[in-house]
């Protein structure tokens, strides 16, 4: 998962997906399909697909990840809030502004409490809120 994150950050989304997929397979074999770590890796695969502009793949991966994380960790867990932020980014990219806003409204208090108001996680969510505000509303 660490190597895949580095590849993702470097913009090598195809190679990152290969590594993430292998990590997910290993995690499933070791922990079971519904384990929180499988959900985290699946989230990371979805985030990578989103960054690569593969919105259909990103949505499938992120929806799967959200189900796993909600079941295994609960909706009040910081990792679920990170997922909500990523899902909000996807929904914003798809033009679903209201859903993106609702996801961010749910995630922000958890992110602030868990990571602190000046954390990278909160700053990233604030950036998404600014993008949401700057995006013109559909007529």
Image (tube, rainbow, N blue to C red):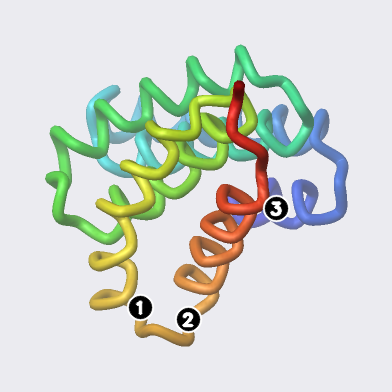
Residue located at (54% from left, 73% from top): 123
Please state which of the two labelled residues, at mark 1 or mark 3, is closer to the viewer.
1
The answer to whether residue 103 is visible is yes
Q: Which residue is mark 1?
A: 115
Q: How many marks are shown on the rendered structure?
A: 3
Residue at 48 percent of width and 68 percent of height: 121
Badges 1 and 3: C-beta atoms under 8 Å apart?
Answer: no
Q: Dot 3: what SS?
A: helix
Residue 98, relative to residue 77: is it above or below?
A: above
In the drawing, does residue 43 fall left or right of residue 133?
Answer: left
Q: Position of residue 80 (x, y in %)?
A: 29, 48
The residue labelled by disc 3 is 3
| Earlier residue among tags 1 and 3 | 3
Crowd band around label 1 with a 10 angstrom C-alpha radius: few (<14), some (14–19), many (20+): some
Q: Which mark is residue 119?
A: 2
Q: Quadrant of the C terminus?
A: top right
Label 2 SS: loop
Quarter of the rendering containing residue 137: top right
Percent position of residue 83, x then y: 39, 44
Q: Tell me if residue 69 comes above or below residue 130 in the rendering.
A: above
With respect to residue 106, does 124 lie above or below? below
What is the secondary structure assignment of the residue under circle 1? Answer: helix
Identity of the residue furthest to the front in this view: 139
Q: Earlier in the sequence, mark 2 or mark 3?
A: 3
Alpha carbons under labels 1 and 3: distance apart = 23 Å
Q: Residue 127, relative to residue 48: is it above or below? A: below
Left or right of 13? Residue 19 is left
- Tags 1 and 2 in contact by the CB under 8 Å rule? yes
């Amino acid at each position: 998962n660490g190597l895949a994150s580095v590849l993702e950050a470097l913009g090598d989304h195809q190679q990152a997906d290969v590594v993430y997929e292998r990590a997910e397979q290993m995690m499933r074999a070791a922990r079971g399909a519904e384990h929180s770590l499988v959900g985290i890796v699946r989230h990371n695969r979805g985030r990578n697909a989103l960054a690569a502009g593969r919105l259909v793949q990103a949505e499938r991966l992120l929806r799967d990840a959200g189900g796993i994380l909600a079941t295994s960790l609960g909706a009040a867990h910081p990792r679920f809030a990170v997922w909500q932020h990523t899902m909000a980014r996807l929904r914003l990219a798809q033009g679903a502004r209201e859903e993106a806003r609702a996801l961010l409204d749910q995630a922000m208090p958890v992110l602030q409490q868990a990571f602190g108001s000046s954390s990278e996680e909160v700053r990233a969510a604030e950036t998404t809120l600014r993008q949401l505000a700057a995006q013109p509303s559909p007529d």
